[in-house]
Image: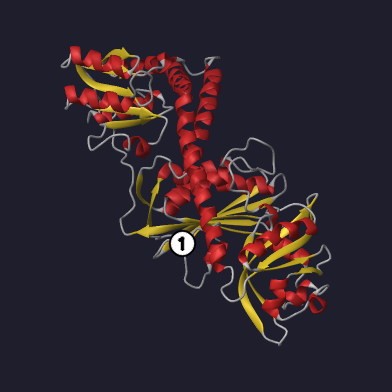
Amino acid sequence: MNGSPISATSVCGAVERCTGVAMVVFSRQGRLIRWSAAAQKLTGWSDADALDKPLSWWLGDETATLEGWSARLGTTGWSSVDVEHPRSDGSSFACRSLVSLVKESDEVSGLVELVGGGDGLRHESSALEEQERLLHAQKLESLGVMAGGIAHDFNILTAVLGNASLVLRDLPFGHTARPLVQNIQDAARRAARLTRELLAYSGRAKFEIRPIDLSAHVRDISHLVRSCISKKANLCLELAEGLPSVEADVAQLQQIVMNLVVNASEAIGDSPGTICVRTGMLRQREDPLRRLIGNQTLPEGECVFLEVSDTGSGIPEAIRARIFEPFFTTKFQGRGLGLSAALGIMRAHKGALGLESSPGSGTRFTAYFPTVSSPPHFTSKTAPVQFRGSGTVLVVDDEESVRSVAGIVLRELGFAVVEAVNGLEAVSLLSQRPREFRAVLLDMAMPVMDGPEAFARIRAVRPDIPIVVTSGYTESDAATRFGPDQPSGFLNKPYTAAQCAEAFMAALELPSPPTGSTP
């Protein structure tokens, strides 16, 4: 709410007339300069009694100042606060008010409060909070749709990743071109990571949930953690033993740890400092609710926590609400979605994220996970089984470069490949030669006839044929496009040659490719 206090009163006067609530306005010096008729009726104080009184009188707190409230509110816009105000008969009344700073040229020039007696503005503030939640949900939905669209439009990344991995496989170690191809592959992976972070922020990332020992997982990736922090930062690990399992996606859990640690490293900068990663159980004597971000709530029952703290510069109150916005940064533009992605991942895991920070005293982020009774899952280390595919696979995609990568991978697995540029052509080919094809790789979004329609028509001709669907959207989003008859497998775009091979072998229930056989 920008402008002078007088312009603020003219705006709020309409609110006062429509709602009947009282309005008071304080000047830059923290003195009362507007005392409405509704305020007089509510408190019994006349204009002569109230005008020019300090903010400390109105709040019944001798230490209250405009500077202190500016730090408390942090940002412009309306905030719902519980306060207590004096009456002329010596009593006081508690209420929930809506308070906003008045700013002029980015400087605080006053404060406006809309006051209700008793329950007063509780209904109005609840409606405001509900509206904020709705707008936030709509923003997340829009971001999820956008992320899937970006991933589809980035089909070229599939060709880049796939072809680069195939070239790397054939280049001998020490070849002068090998570092150049690796740079291409790394750049494509960073671009693909942006899409995954958008999906994570919106809560629509692809998850493979299983019971995990949080301490063991952090210990396993500690070498990665150490590699991404400042050389002057000391990494401290305090990992509790014997914690209950948490249900989480390994890749997303790793992203939370790395994003929080990288943020801590950037807060320390080039100065010496300490980053501490700690795990443990939430104890009843602790009060984490006051530290939770936004409208989050802690999961019921016991919680396991992951805490990342630093001795950096701390986060000013004025920007704390913004650090979880996509691409917001105080460093330089284009930093991505580190903290916002972490918040989205915690939301999707039915957990919560807390924040404690003050300028000059460092920052502490705490991720709270609900516990489960299942034992943690460990990946088998048994030797892979050799395999050789057979038969013909129908590859359906409107991008020639994507069809080319998939075709190379599938041929190397032992399959013959027939290509189709859209769903209509695929249905025609399969209808003409229904028993020729062993499986189908089917893109979701194509011109002429899209994936879901082609899927239904193909299954009408061959109900038994395995169909692997590929899309820039997440597997859960893609699943909603199909009825009870779901695809045999899902391949998220952009994908590498190895991911293509693994998805296909899983859909056909064949042994996984041996390590190193497919890049």
Q: Position of residue 168 (x, y in %)?
A: 46, 19
Q: Position of residue 57 (x, y in %)?
A: 76, 77
Residue 466 lies in quadrant:
top left
Residue 11 lies in quadrant:
bottom right
- Please state if 313 lies on the left or on the right of 282 as rendered: right
For image coordinates 82% across by 77% down, the residue present is: 48
Residue kind at label 1, given as amino acid type? Leu
For image coordinates 50% across by 73% down, the residue present is: 285
- Tell me if residue 332 comes above or below residue 4 in the rendering: above
- Tell me if residue 80 comes above or below residue 198 in the rendering: below
* Count of marks overlaid on the render: 1
In the displayed orientation, state which residue is furthest to the front.
Answer: 17
Residue 79 lies in quadrant:
bottom right
For image coordinates 80% across by 49% down, the residue present is: 105
Instruction: Work out whether residue 68 can be spotted.
Output: yes
Q: Which residue is mark 1?
A: 298
Q: Secondary structure at mark 1?
A: loop
Q: Position of residue 6 (x, y in %)?
A: 80, 59
For image coordinates 41% across by 13% down, the residue present is: 400
